Amino acid sequence: MKTKRSHVKTTALTASSRAARRLRKSILAASCLSAFFLLLPLPATHAGIQAVRIAGGFTQPLYVCAPPGDTARLFVAEQGGKIKIINVPSGTVNSAPFLDISAEVAQNAGGGILGMTFDPNYATNGRFFVSYTTARGGVFGWGVSHIARFTVSADPNVADRASELTVLTVDQTQTDHNVDWIGFSPRNGDEGNLYICSGDGGHIEDNGPGHPPGGNAQSLQTLLGKILRIHIEENGTYTIPSNNPFFGSTTEKQEIWAYGLRNPFRASFDRKSGTMYIGDVGETLREEVDVNSRSNPGGGQNFGWRVREGFIQNPRYADDPPPPNAVDPILDYEHDTTGICVIGGYVYRGNSVRDLRGLYVFGDCFGPENGDFTGRIFTLTYRGGVASDFQDITSELFPTRIGGYTLGAVTSFGEDPNGELYITDLNGNVFQIQNAR
């Protein structure tokens, strides 16, 4: 087997050399075939799609979303600590940020604002949640990840900075693989439950200072390397849903909903089926997409990291037995052929782009290891527990037909209230995928 240098993935987002770009990978981060074998030629029907630049000029935009029911605005979270508003009809960006916590968040490679979401009842309570990491502090001295609640001010385009209420904190063992994506479930019976994707704390191969024997991802005594689920109470505190797998435990962390993850940087719920899709950024060889079906609302899945990476045994731990309860991803792909940093996306449920209906749209931040280190946009079909028809649709979207914009490193996908999809990249752009017919 070809030996590879392990990738220490960070977000040093401005370096231009190949080595520096490889270093950036850390943040972003029932078929048994790898994506190498699933990748198929692009069907002619995808000629009906295009990417349109909605706005630009952002600094390290890492997420885009909108409040429920608000089709006139998009909110863009910049890693450095600002959330800005795009006025969709005009394509203009408000000069004043919606929220500015630059003085509070880390400005290093792995910190800053890494996720945000709006309360399902935002229209009436004005509350939203931000996932961010500080530069220092915590028991390890490498910063603290915060889930914080904020409230909008009397001005709908400006948040009340003083309204911050800390919901949950996690001490980080290194500057990367922090707490990233957060979101509320659309599943019936799951109302008010906030899902939180947490990386394994960094270092290489879930090992080193701050990592117990066997790694953080497999330990049930830490919140690192997990998906957490908590119920948000009216006063901003949280309780544990009674069907969480370790509810009532005095030894395991009750917030844990799923575990065995390296860096689940981006996730989403299919608004129609309720299936949760998780893009888990790999280490040396593979990237993977995992799912949780609405038929398993209590979670409890072990996705196998650090002993497993994708469908394979992690060569770093070749002699360690795989966890007996480890579950396979629905898809993995190789760094050599496809990409080195998966970015989880959304199942398209909008009405304007018929060629994408029902497809899971996701991507890779940098593309193949030996490529040009620009992003890739993929689709796949997931039906009956099987992933199929893995396609690379990047060339159908970029360069854009209007303006000739190229795609930079992909940082995230977003979904508006109508189910339309957006892409953010490190060139500072926000694109919408639209119908081209």
Image (cartoon, helix red, strand yellow):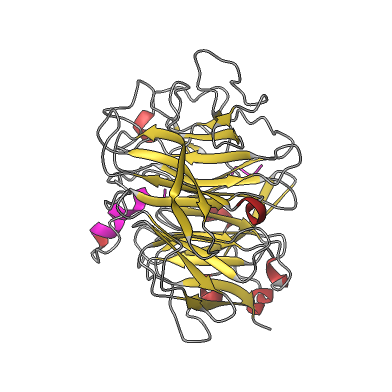
Asked if the magenta segment contains residue 20, the reply would be yes
In the picture as drawn, the residue positioned furthest to the top comes out as 250
| Residue 334 visible from this viewpoint | no
Q: Is residue 302 left or right of residue 175?
A: right
| Nearest the eye: 139 or 376 | 139
Residue 224: x, y in percent? 42, 32
Eyeballing the image, is 172 above or below 266?
above
The quadrant of the rendering that contains the N terminus is top left
| Nearest the eye: 75 or 225 | 75
Q: Is residue 119 left or right of residue 13?
A: right
Q: Quadrant of residue 375?
A: bottom left
| Nearest the eye: 211 or 99 | 99
Query: In the image, what residue occupies the spot 44% across and 30% down?
Result: 217
Eyeballing the image, is 259 above or below 252?
below
Q: Is residue 27 left or right of residue 295?
A: left
Residue 396: x, y in percent? 56, 76
Query: In the image, what residue occupies the spot 48% across and 22% down?
Result: 220
Asked if the magenta segment contains residue 23, the reply would be yes
Residue 145: x, y in percent? 39, 39
Residue 309: x, y in percent? 46, 38
| Residue 349 visible from this viewpoint | yes
| Nearest the eye: 317 or 419 | 419
Magenta segment:
19-32
The quadrant of the rendering that contains the C terminus is bottom right
The count of marks equals 0
